Amino acid sequence: MNPLILLLYLAPPSSDPSVPVGPPISALLRINQTIESYDEIGRNCAISASSFEPVPVPSSDFGKFYEGDSYIALSTKEDKQKKLSWDIFYWLGSKTSQDESGAAAILAVELDDGLGGGPVQHREVQGHESNEFLQFFKPAIRYVPGGVASGFNHVDINAPGQKRLYQIKGKKNIRVQLVEPTVKSMNKGDCFILDNGRDLYIYVGPNSKGTEKLKARAAANQIKDQDHHGRAKVYTVDSSATKDEVATFFKELGSGSAAEVPEAPATDDDLEFEKKVENTVALYKVSDAGGKLQTEKVGEKPLKSSMLKPEDSFILDTGAPGIYVWVGKTSNTQEKVEALKKGQVFLKNNNYPAWTKMIRVVQGAEPSAFKEYFAEWRDATLKGAPRKP
């Protein structure tokens, strides 16, 4: 059964008394605990906060993310035994404020606590989202300028005369990212979508793959529905286009010609990073004695679950895939928030990119992907010999 997604973005509390505030986190839990149908889980719910107010995102806008905002996504799953499990993703836009990103982390922990401490928590960064997160937003995830909570405005995407050029990136899971509307931003290996405020033009790079053209078309239809209320026309400029059709595209772009489109870049920075990072799995005990993060390597492969102590916090460094921050089940809310901060300091101290994947897990609710890094794993609820993960 596919997971049900509740998506929220953070905004300052409204000073207008006529604007309704979402129910507190306890209301979300009551709905989850009393529902008659799985389809009702997570619907029409919000959580409250002192400095930022999570606002539900309508399903029609799923996939459209404002760069100046932060978002929280709650994924609810139900297994064959009707048991619920959750994943909490908090997404940080490239221009989100430090206060807002901190509020997102705290709200994610509060939501986690309200759900009994069982959810796995994921930090997602714009442009470097995990496949697990991207798969929730079909046909594509799209970044648009603006933001409420960080002092920006949610801009009028369909403002007359505004011109936007989107680049289509990705294979299985698609990202639609805004680039400068000039021919210099384009290349022959990708597909691009030009939105002139009235209509949409899909430019298919001559060296792009056929599947990319299909995904670009799906993304253009998404933009048409979300930003133009389904009224814009969609034109495709590919190898079968006439000279006049090609000329029209560059006239609308206001820059260059087909001959001036640059060649595709030879390398991918993300792939280069992943190639450079040695995939050595290591487990570290972490503490902040004296106000400074201290790490002590506990071991490398093969790891055992007995290395994890409930009174401490640990970081499992898996190399390019990212890091896990593990905390004991007795940790309080503040300790759980601090655990994520320790993870960020760990990334900085080890010269990892700020967008490196970071997942926080709590003792007793470890996902199978975490357990697979241990040659022996003993669940707290099990007795007897350790089992293979």
Image (cartoon, rainbow, N blue to C red):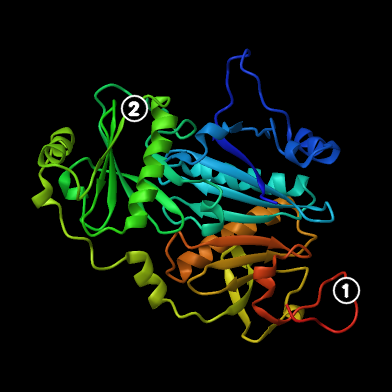
Q: x%, y% of residue 131? A: 52, 58
> Please, what is the three-letter code of the amino acid marked with disc 2?
Ala
- Which of the two discs, 2 and 1, sits closer to the camera? 2
Assess disc 1: are there few (<14), some (14-19) or many (≥20) residues with their C-alpha within 10 Å of its C-alpha. few
Q: Nearer the viewer, residue 93 or 5?
A: 5
Corner quadrant of residue 37? top right
List the residue tagged with mark 2. Answer: 232
Number of numbered discs on residues: 2
Q: Is residue 51 above or below residue 270?
A: above
Q: Which residue is at a point 44% across and 59% down the rendered structure image?
A: 354
Element assignment for label 2 = loop
> Please, what is the three-letter code of the amino acid marked with disc 1?
Leu
Q: Nearer the viewer, residue 232 or 168?
A: 232
Assess disc 2: are there few (<14), some (14-19) or many (≥20) residues with their C-alpha within 10 Å of its C-alpha. some
List the residue tagged with mark 1. Answer: 382
Q: x%, y% of residue 57? A: 57, 33
Corner quadrant of residue 181? top left
- Position of 270 with respect to 123 (left or right) is left
Q: Which residue is at a point 16% across and 46% down the rendered structure image?
A: 183
